[in-house]
Image: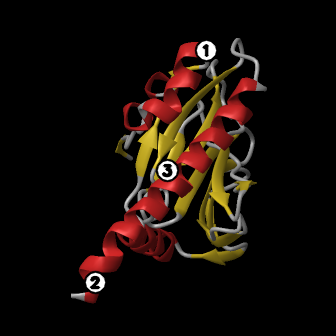
Amino acid sequence: MLFTLFAPAANVNAASKRTKALTAYQKKLKKLDSKIYKFALVYLDKDSIPELVITSKESAHAIYGEIYTYNNGKLKNLKYAGSDFGQFIYSPKKSAAYNSSWINGYGAVSTFYRFSKTGKSTKLKRFDAIVNPKTSYKINNKKVSKKKYYAEYKKMEKKYPLKQISLKNAFNLTTKNIKNITKNYKSFIVTGAKY
């Protein structure tokens, strides 16, 4: 009986926090150059407030991406490094993201991160597949066998199933889109394709 009395208040409180977050996202987006940036909303964690993803409009080998969350009345930049070709790779509702890039003359570097609501990131695991001068593998800067490398990588993918959002899934920074975030935020939420 008590639950039914307090449940609507909790829903109103969550909606109020979401509106404040969306308004803060609008202010952030208004300051950006529409010729350079695009945006989308994602559910990085389990709450009802989506996170804001900002990416470059143009594709390049490695693009820096930004992810913002809203906590205690402030926007928090989650310090995400981005991935090749402007992709945002994350594990929905698990507060985890992944960046991956190919470094010429070295090999591939992939890192799993976990985020707190305060904006602090924790590096879970870094995977290096080195091809020069000879093929070798590292996890958190320690040399490992190829078998261990791929076994650990698969464990991380199982624990944090990955989705990718590419530039084509993001939205242009138009006045209309920015204005509609608070009116119809669900239309800007993207989940991405399986990575």
Residue depicted at 45% across the width and 67% down the height: 94
| Label 1 environment density (alpha carbons within 10 Å; few <14, some 14–19, many ≥20) | few
Q: Which residue is mark 1?
A: 175
Task: Give above or below for 180 relative to 10.
Answer: above
Q: Decide: marks 3, 2 in contact (CB < 8 A)?
A: no
Q: Point out the frontmost of discs 1 and 3.
A: 1
Q: Amino acid at mark 2?
A: Phe
Which x, y percent locates residue 18?
A: 52, 52
Give the Cα separation between the discs numbered 1 and 3: 20 Å
Q: Is 115 or 82 nearer to us in this picture?
A: 115
State the residue in front, 125 or 182: 182
For the point 38% across and 63% down, the residue is 11
Which of the marked residues, 3 or 2, is nearer the chain's N terminus?
Answer: 2
> Closer to the camera, 121 or 75?
75
Q: Is residue 92 left or right of residue 54?
A: left
- Residue 137: image quadrant is bottom right
> For mark 2, what is the residue?
3
Residue drawn 53% across the image and 63% down it: 96
Amino acid tagged 1: Thr
Name the residue that disc number 3 marks: 50
| Distance (Cα) linking label 3 and label 2 | 26 Å
Q: Which secondary structure lies at badge 2?
A: helix
Residue 65 at what x, y percent from top left? Answer: 67, 40
Q: CA distance from mark 2 to mark 1?
A: 42 Å
Q: Amino acid at mark 3?
A: Pro
In the rendered view, tell whether residue 94 sits above or below residue 182.
below
The N terminus, quarter of image: bottom left
**What is the secondary structure assignment of the residue under circle 1?**
helix
Mark 2 or 1, nearer chain start = 2
